[in-house]
Amino acid sequence: MRRIESSQNSQVKHWKRLVTVRKERDKSGEFLVEGFHLVEEALKKPDLVLSIIIREGITIPKAWNVEDIEIIEVTMDIAVEIAETEHSQGIYAHCSQPKSTTDQQQNWKKLLFIDAVQDPGNVGTMIRTADAAGMDAVILGKGSADAFNPKTVRSGQGSHFHIPIVKGDLSQWIQSCKYKKIAVYGTSLEDSVTYNDVEPQQQFALIMGNEGSGLSPEILVQTDMNLKIPLLGQAESLNVAVATGILLYTLIPINIKS
Amino acid sequence: MRRIESSQNSQVKHWKRLVTVRKERDKSGEFLVEGFHLVEEALKKPDLVLSIIIREGITIPKAWNVEDIEIIEVTMDIAVEIAETEHSQGIYAHCSQPKSTTDQQQNWKKLLFIDAVQDPGNVGTMIRTADAAGMDAVILGKGSADAFNPKTVRSGQGSHFHIPIVKGDLSQWIQSCKYKKIAVYGTSLEDSVTYNDVEPQQQFALIMGNEGSGLSPEILVQTDMNLKIPLLGQAESLNVAVATGILLYTLIPINIKS
């Protein structure tokens, strides 16, 4: 096991920048996850794990298969520097961001498109919800919080290792869906149908928009149909991740009978 | 307009404790809200607003009706002390927690019960979701985050002023529902029916449980029926506020046809 004691070490600087600087994540295609649960989820995709970093005194659970993975021990000071949360568990995985091939992308039939959702916690919860609903992938359009921001990863609860996440041009993705006859649903209060008037679909794309302003106008004109969730009380809106859950669990076919 | 310049002022100390100490909120039955949007929502229930606090240099929007409300100006230093968020807008409302009478409570027919949900952001989003779904009230059982914690209030997005929130003994509330023939739905993966096998109900109580462990065993044995949301991907669970949205929007009758 390697041990690093200097916070001036170039690797420590890289880890720290992965936590704090989006450009560093974008450029390197890497990210850092924190805590026992997320590191364990990362290890289910061992090809993505570049190294596991532990604070001195922390022991890796015996049940984990880490034979082929580099373990790096760091001092308490370094562990604090690369920690995102105040009460860090002192264990991290330095990971590659998962990639998907064009061939894989061609086969996706159930897609969640995220259009300029700004809060990382919301984006992470939406990724987790898409995973739970058995979606094939999440596509993040421009203006959205970074999928690999530590806050996004934390709210994703491991789903970053379960479901492909792609940054892309939503207009191009919508065109590709139309070509493949996949229905594209937007969300809007105007010119829209109530969510529960729509039948479950074997293939579809759902687009969710910005917390304050909803879908961008240029995206809205490209949808096949827009859905709305009635607000029956005095709330002005629903949280975007909650709305995502309601709509995905309306659109996906549930065949499990109790 | 009164102006306070000393952070040793007893009122400033009380505001600060309302933000940071649950006991202070419980004992006084008061809380503080922050930011233009929440203060505006508070003003829709003027009886609850004890005073509006503004940082020097901040102007109250002309459209607001604040004639009968005390406005207190404070220095930048005091504004920072009572701020919950880093980028505070410098405007606060010191409010009484809304109360409901036994007579009002007797008429409630659509209820959300929260059993030991610990994250204030989750509890706030659940209150907002219950408001959106047109529920009559939210009942918070023991072990839940405080409804009037600043983080809970922030995620509530104003719903604290729209829907009654009561702290209570969930077992007693369940008994009261049974007496009134109101169906009580729990949530569980075992001995449960899939959420979309249940028809919308004119009256019901839904109980949502702790983020990690779900419903308490003593609550689970008292429900009429338990619901589950199938997990179709690899996610181990849904966020509790997202699950609340899916279940409430399955159980409430949606009569609005597009």
Image: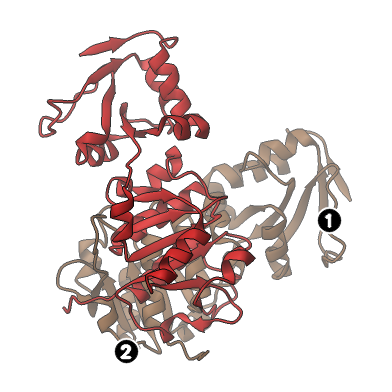
Chain colours: A brown, B red
Q: Nearer the viewer, residue A185 or A5?
A: A185
Contact between marks 2 and 1 (CB within 8 A): the answer is no
A237 displayed left or right of A70: left
Q: Nearer the viewer, residue B8 or A169?
A: B8
Query: Could you classify mark 1 by the number of other residues whose Cα lies within 10 Å: few (under 14), some (14-19), or many (20 or more)?
Result: some
Query: Could you classify mark 2 by the number of other residues whose Cα lies within 10 Å: few (under 14), some (14-19), or many (20 or more)?
Result: few
B196 displayed left or right of B66: right
Q: Amino acid at mark 2?
A: Lys
Chain to which mark 1 belongs: A
Q: Is residue A233 above or below residue A109?
A: above
Find residue A41 and report its image quarter: bottom right
Counting residues from the start of the chain, the first of labels 2 and 1 encountered is 1
Find residue A198 and report its image quarter: bottom left
Q: Amino acid at mark 1?
A: Ile
Quick one: SS at disc 1?
A: loop
Q: Is residue B230 above or below residue A29?
A: below
Marks 2 and 1 sit apart, C-alpha to C-alpha, by: 48 Å
For disc 2, the marked residue is A181
For disc 1, the marked residue is A60
Q: Residue at x 25, y 38 (%)?
A: B42
